[in-house]
């Protein structure tokens, strides 16, 4: 059974969505909303933040008292490729550091529409290459939420194509993997989703891809060659319309005997992890992430 807190959170989100009468946020509204949300769920006490440039890509090191300096989680924030920042996701990234017992390198990749594809994936690959000079790939895990989860998979595909050593594992939190939004099951969930709008997904996809084919595997990595990837953890919420992407990914990986741990959380919304210690299910999901990553460090 879902916690009372998760029920109240869902009801509150549905009320907000009804109040907007089906109108998704504008770009500026979405950016502002995500930054404000991040301030409501800040980093835990005793978290250390250190700005750093990874071959010119702005990043920050996040350390907690539990962080092992020999283990790194490379984190890509969500925000539909057009919103989000180091600041908005600092709380989520910090709790990820605490759960995995690692340092987190959070990447401030460039956003659309000012910087459409391939700017974001160029930045994530650059950050990974910089990180490889600091530590061994076996001590690196990738993690991301929503669009950041899509970037995790797209980055792995690019690293594989470039014949770079792959990280030890990947964590995809409610990943956005198919920017075509053509999965018929997505429409079935759209009316129940208290956060996302299909029209908003379409607009964000167009801003990010611009003139490119949405089925380009570096834009929609669900269409890529998924063989020979590191073990992946995929977490989705049952009330999230893009949970269909995570389900499709898990099924494809299982069909080709790739290692995947798939979790569908009942009654959970898109990236419920964001609420951190204020939501029991967020804490439990982070604990699952920590257990998964810690079984794959070498």
Image (spheres, rainbow, N blue to C red):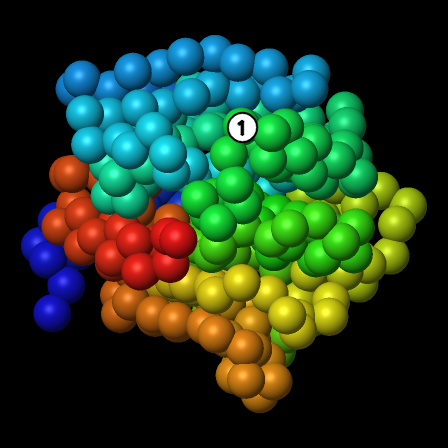
Q: Is residue 24 visible?
A: no
Badge 1, how many Cα within 10 Å: few under 14, some, many 20+?
few
In the rendered view, tell whether residue 36 sits above or below residue 147. Answer: above
Which one is nearer the viewer's eye here, 298 or 159? 298
Residue at the limit of the structure toward the top, as seen here: 51
In the rendered view, tell whether residue 225 sits above or below residue 269. Answer: below
How many numbered callouts? 1
Residue at 51% x, 34% y: name it.
135
263 relative position to 181: left or right: left
Residue at 48% x, 49% y: name it.
138
Percent x, y for residue 266?
26, 70
293 relative position to 189: left or right: left
Image quarter of the N terminus: bottom left
**Residue position for label 1:** 134
In the rendered view, tell whether residue 264 sits above or below residue 6. Answer: below
163 relative position to 146: left or right: right
User: Which image quadrant is residue 160 in?
Assistant: bottom right
User: Which image quadrant is residue 48 in?
Assistant: top left
Percent x, y for residue 230?
53, 63
Residue at the limit of the structure toward the right, as seen here: 211
Residue at 47% x, 64% y: name it.
232
User: Which image quadrant is residue 59 in?
Assistant: top right
Q: Is residue 140 visible?
A: yes
Residue at the limit of the structure toward the left, as seen here: 4
Task: Tell me the SS state at disc 1.
Answer: loop
Percent x, y for residue 247?
49, 74
């Amino acid at each position: 059974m879902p916690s009372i807190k998760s029920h109240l959170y869902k009801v509150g989100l549905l009320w907000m969505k009804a109040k907007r009468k089906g109108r998704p946020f504008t770009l500026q509204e979405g950016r502002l909303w995500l930054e404000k949300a991040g301030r409501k769920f800040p980093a835990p006490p005793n978290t250390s933040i250190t700005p750093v440039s990874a071959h010119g890509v702005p990043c920050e090191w996040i350390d907690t008292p539990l962080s092992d300096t020999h283990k790194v989680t490379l984190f890509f924030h969500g925000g539909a490729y057009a919103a989000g920042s180091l600041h908005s996701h600092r709380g989520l990234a910090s709790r990820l550091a605490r759960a995995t017992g690692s340092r987190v390198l959070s990447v401030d990749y460039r956003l659309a529409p000012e910087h459409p594809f391939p700017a974001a994936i160029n930045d994530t690959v650059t950050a990974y290459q910089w990180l490889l000079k600091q530590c061994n790939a076996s001590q690196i895990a990738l993690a991301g939420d929503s669009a950041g989860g899509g970037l995790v998979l797209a980055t792995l595909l690019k690293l594989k194509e470039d014949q770079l050593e792959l990280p030890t594992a990947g964590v995809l939190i409610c990943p956005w993997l198919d920017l075509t939004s053509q999965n018929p099951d997505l429409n079935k969930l759209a009316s129940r989703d208290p956060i996302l709008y299909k029209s908003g997904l379409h607009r964000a996809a167009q801003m990010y891809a611009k003139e490119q084919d949405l089925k380009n595997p570096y834009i929609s990595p669900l269409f890529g060659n998924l063989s020979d990837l590191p073990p992946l953890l995929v977490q989705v919420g049952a009330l999230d319309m893009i949970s269909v992407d995570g389900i499709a990914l898990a099924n494809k990986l299982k069909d080709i005997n790739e290692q995947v741990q798939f979790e569908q959380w009942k009654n959970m919304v898109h990236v419920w992890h964001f609420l951190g210690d204020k939501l029991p299910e967020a804490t439990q999901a982070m604990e699952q992430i920590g257990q998964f990553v810690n079984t794959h460090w070498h």
